[in-house]
Image (cartoon, helix red, strand yellow):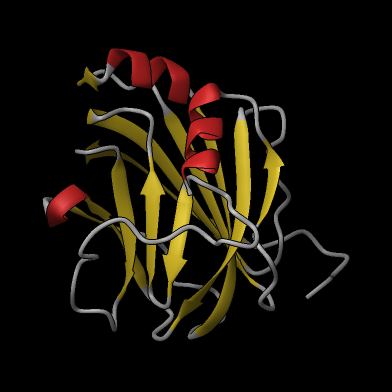
Amino acid sequence: MERDETPTVETAQMDVEVHYRHAYLLDEDDDCYPDGMLDDSPAHPVGIIRVEKGIAFLITGLHTGTVSFTVAVADQDPGADLEGYEDIVEISFESPSGYISLYESGGAGVHGIPSLSAGPGTYRFRYHARGMDAAREKNFSDVVIDHYFLQIWPALHSDPVVLKSTSSYFRYWLSAG
C-alpha cells in the first residue's frame, strides 16, 4: 500500500508491568493467553517478537517491573525510527477482528490500543527496543529502563526481517530460537 501522502497515525503510550520478560498482544477474537513462549520463525528468526494468528509475544529486557511501551497504528508504513532505538525487527501478523490489546504478563493488566486501521486482516509489526542490555543487568525495577515502540500498519504477508541489531541481549534471543 504505497502512497505519496503522510501516514495517518494513532498512538497510545503506556507503562506496562512485565514478569518473566514479556508482554503480549491478543486479538479480540482470541479468548486465551499463550500457554508459553511462541516459536520464533525458523527460516527468518527475529528473536524478540513471535507471532501466531491473533497473538504476538513481545520480549523485554527487564525480568520484572515497569517498561515503557508506545504503540502506533498507521494506515501505511510510517517508517522506522532507526536513530532512536538499538534493535528493530519486523514481522507479519494476522488479526481476525481488527482489534487487539496489550496484555501484561499473566493477564494482570490490559492496555487498549487504537483499532487497526483496515479492520480484520494482515498487518506488519515493527518492534523497536532500547535499553534491553541495561534492563537485563538490573533484572528487577519499578523505574523504566527499557523502552519499546511497536508500529502497526496494513500490509501483505512477508518474511520477518531484522532491521537493526546492536544489543547483546537481542543477539541472545536471535540465537535462542
Residue 19, compared with residue 52, is above or below; it is above
Residue 97 lies, with reference to residue 101, above or below; the image says below
Q: At x 66% / y 76%, what residue is drawn? A: 157
- The answer to whether residue 119 is left or right of residue 96 is right
Q: Position of 102 compared to 175: left or right?
A: left
Horizontally, residue 142 falls left or right of residue 161, namely: left
Q: Specify the farthest residue to the right.
A: 4
Q: Residue at x 45, y 65 (%)?
A: 51
> 87 or 114, which is in the foreground?
87
Residue nearer the viewer, 148 or 158:
158
Q: Which of these two is toward me, 62 or 45?
A: 45
Residue 82, image quadrant: top right
Residue 86 position in % (x across, y down): 61, 27
Residue 34: x and y, percent? 24, 65
Query: In the rendered view, would you say 42 is above or below 145?
Result: below
- Quadrant of the image occupied by residue 165: top right
Quadrant of the snapshot with the N terminus: bottom right
**Residue 119 at what x, y percent from top left?**
50, 83
Residue drawn 31% across and 27% down?
62
Q: In which quarter of the image is residue 102?
A: bottom left
